[in-house]
Image (cartoon, grey):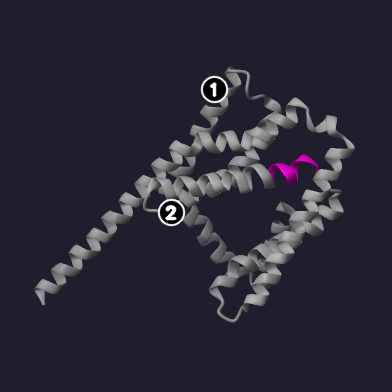
């Protein structure tokens, strides 16, 4: 995925180096604003503290470092961004969404895809298909010209790729069941879900602060509109 992302960025920038390059730098600058750095930095320290405590308890080992880093850069940052921009107005609704992501993304997708990797040539093709069609799936709701049949086709392609990974996982597990039952495999399996669940208090705090800031902003706008109305 990283290879295709870099290739895509190089291709895009080569089309308009000055314009697209400037826009890309603006996006990078927007990412490094203090509030975002504060939230991500706090999440990184929080996750590192969890891993340190688990290591002292003999539940986390250096062999799980790669899975831990992948989790933070992937699932962790997505969960943090969702918490900061959540539209859920109550804790139960928000917690249900987080747990759904734990099951659907952290446990199933990450483990099935990473437990038995396909040959590099197949991975390159499937990752390219995933990147293109996930981008199309994200763009489709904002384009009124995209028909329901097109959306079903996009979803069908993504489901097919998912079934390919799942089928390869099942076939590999049946061929070598002992390799699936090792400590490292089990640790890689539980790293994502356990860290996600352990991150929930931090995510809840981010979501609560985000809602408070949003409410304050709305109150400020309403008060300003009222003052303007009274002045008129």
Q: In this view, does 20 lie to the left or right of 29?
A: right
Q: Residue 224: where, in percent of width, then height?
A: 19, 66
Q: Is residue 166 left or right of residue 213?
A: right
In this rendering, the label closer to the viewer, 2 or 1: 2
The residue lying at 60 percent from left, 37 percent from top is: 193
Question: Quadrant of residue 114 in the image?
Answer: top right
Magenta region, residue range: 110-116
- How far apart marks 2 and 1 lie (CA) works out to 29 Å
Q: Does residue 52 belong to the magenta stretch?
A: no
Q: How many neighbours does mark 1 have within 10 angstroms: few (below 14), some (14-19), or many (20 or more)?
A: few
What kind of element bears circle 2? loop
Q: How many neighbours does mark 2 have within 10 angstroms: few (below 14), some (14-19), or many (20 or more)?
A: some
Vertical comparison of 122 with 77: above or below: below
**Who comes first in sequence, dot 2 or dot 1?**
1
- On the question of residue 36 being in view, the answer is no
What kind of element bears circle 1? helix
Question: Quadrant of residue 62 in the image?
Answer: top right
The residue lying at 44 percent from left, 38 percent from top is: 202
Q: Is residue 142 left or right of residue 206?
A: right
Q: Residue 109: where, in percent of width, then height?
A: 68, 47
Q: In the picture, which quadrant includes the C terminus? A: bottom left
Vertical comparison of 84 with 69: above or below: below
Label at residue 53: 1
Q: How many marks?
A: 2
Vertical comparison of 56 with 162: above or below: above
- On the question of residue 81 being in view, the answer is yes
Direction right: furthest residue: 175
Q: Is residue 178 left or right of residue 186?
A: right
Direction bottom: furthest residue: 145
The residue lying at 55 percent from left, 38 percent from top is: 196
């Amino acid at each position: 995925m990283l290879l295709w992302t870099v290739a895509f960025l190089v291709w895009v920038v080569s089309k308009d180096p000055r314009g697209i390059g400037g826009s890309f730098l603006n996006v990078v600058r927007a990412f490094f604003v203090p509030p975002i750095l504060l939230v991500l930095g706090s999440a990184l320290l929080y996750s590192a503290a969890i891993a340190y405590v688990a290591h002292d308890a003999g539940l986390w080992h250096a062999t799980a470092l790669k899975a831990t880093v992948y989790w933070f850069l992937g699932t962790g940052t997505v969960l943090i961004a969702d918490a900061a921009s959540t539209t859920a107005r109550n804790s139960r609704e928000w917690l249900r969404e987080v747990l759904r992501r734990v099951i659907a993304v952290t446990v199933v997708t990450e483990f099935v895809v990473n437990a038995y990797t396909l040959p590099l040539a197949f991975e390159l093709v499937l990752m390219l298909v995933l990147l293109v069609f996930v981008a199309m799936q994200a763009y489709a709701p904002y384009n009124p010209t995209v028909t329901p049949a097109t959306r079903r086709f996009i979803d069908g392609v993504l489901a097919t790729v998912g079934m390919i990974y799942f089928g390869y996982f099942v076939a590999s597990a049946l061929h070598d069941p002992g390799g699936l039952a090792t400590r490292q495999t089990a640790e890689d399996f539980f790293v994502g879900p356990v860290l996600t669940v352990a991150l929930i208090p931090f995510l809840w705090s981010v979501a609560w602060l985000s809602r408070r800031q949003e409410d304050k902003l709305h109150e400020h706008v309403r008060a300003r509109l009222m003052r303007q109305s009274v002045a008129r």
